[in-house]
């Protein structure tokens, strides 16, 4: 059965610092992988996705993620965090029956 | 192009009442998904529908919950005889045909159900 683990429930970084959010997945075949962001009281916005090909994926808002099959990981990165990046981040795997991780809440310190 | 629309945005029901949540997919999308998000948790898949067909309802509770996506009109998630544990945010998403490189699910703003 497919599943997603986001080991970090809450992360705090200083504005301008780099960011890495971890995501590990379990899936029977080559997975479709996604990162979504959710601001308080809002729906989810897609940051980036991986289907196949280049394992380093560029997304919106300066985010990128790297698919590492050997580690079953799809970590999200950003070189310099902005205060507006404070939100909840969800990793997801699958297709029509998408499975979401529990989320990582990002706090940005001034 | 309007995004996925959900209404109402907030819904308050007393225990035992029925809740009806509506979702209009993006234009050109014929695939609809419903998710539930409990406080401090991620989204849990409930059901996947196409027009007039339930494709996968493996995440739906066995009782009181039902979903439909008629030929005309929005998709409806119906919860009968609501209980306090049904209080959550319910999100709808829509997509084009799965399996293509353009596939992604677009999410609506959600309906926040409160059962008193």
Image (cartoon, grey):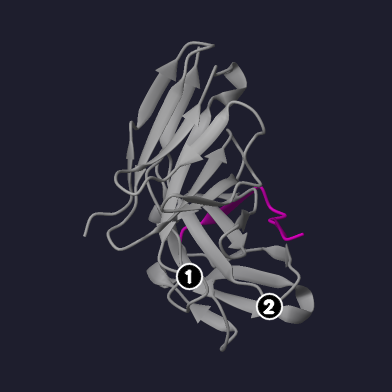
How packed mark 2 is, by other alpha carbons closer than 10 Å (few <14, some 14-19, many 20 or more), is few
* Residue A53, position as x, y percentages in the image: 57, 88
Vertical placement of A63 versus A90: above or below?
Answer: below
The magenta segment is A1-15
User: Which of pointers 2 and 1 indicates the residue nearer the eye?
Assistant: 2
How packed mark 1 is, by other alpha carbons closer than 10 Å (few <14, some 14-19, many 20 or more), is many
> Do the residues at pointers 2 and 1 share their chain?
yes
The residue drawn where x is 65% and y is 34% is B61
* Residue A59, position as x, y percentages in the image: 44, 73
Magenta includes A7? Answer: yes
Closer to us: A18 or B77: B77
Which residue is labeled 1 in the image? A48
Mark with earlier residue (2, 1): 2
Q: Chain of mark 2?
A: A
* Residue B62, position as x, y percentages in the image: 67, 33
Magenta includes A68? Answer: no
Give the quarter of the image for residue A31: bottom right
Which residue is labeled 2 in the image? A30
Residue farthest to the left, as pictured: B1
């Amino acid at each position: 059965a497919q599943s997603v683990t986001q080991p970090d429930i809450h992360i705090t970084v200083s504005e301008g610092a780099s960011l890495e959010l971890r995501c590990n997945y379990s899936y029977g075949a080559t997975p479709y992988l996604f990162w979504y962001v959710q601001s308080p009281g809002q729906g989810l916005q897609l940051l980036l996705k991986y289907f196949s090909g280049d394992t380093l994926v560029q997304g919106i808002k300066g985010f990128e993620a790297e698919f590492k099959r050997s580690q079953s990981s799809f970590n999200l990165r950003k070189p310099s965090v902005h205060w507006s990046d404070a939100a909840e981040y969800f990793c997801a795997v699958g297709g029509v029956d998408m499975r979401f991780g529990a989320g990582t809440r990002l706090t940005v310190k001034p | 192009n309007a995004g996925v629309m959900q209404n109402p945005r907030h819904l308050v029901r007393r225990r035992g009442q029925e809740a009806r949540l509506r979702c209009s997919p993006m234009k050109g999308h014929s695939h609809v998904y419903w998710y539930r998000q409990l406080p401090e948790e991620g989204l849990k898949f409930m059901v996947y529908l196409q027009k007039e067909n339930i494709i996968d309802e493996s995440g739906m509770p066995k009782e009181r919950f039902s979903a439909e996506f008629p030929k005309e009109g929005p998709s409806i998630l119906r919860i009968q005889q609501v209980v306090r544990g049904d209080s959550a945010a319910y999100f709808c998403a829509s997509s084009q045909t799965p399996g293509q490189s353009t596939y992604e699910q677009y999410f609506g703003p959600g309906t926040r159900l409160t059962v008193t």
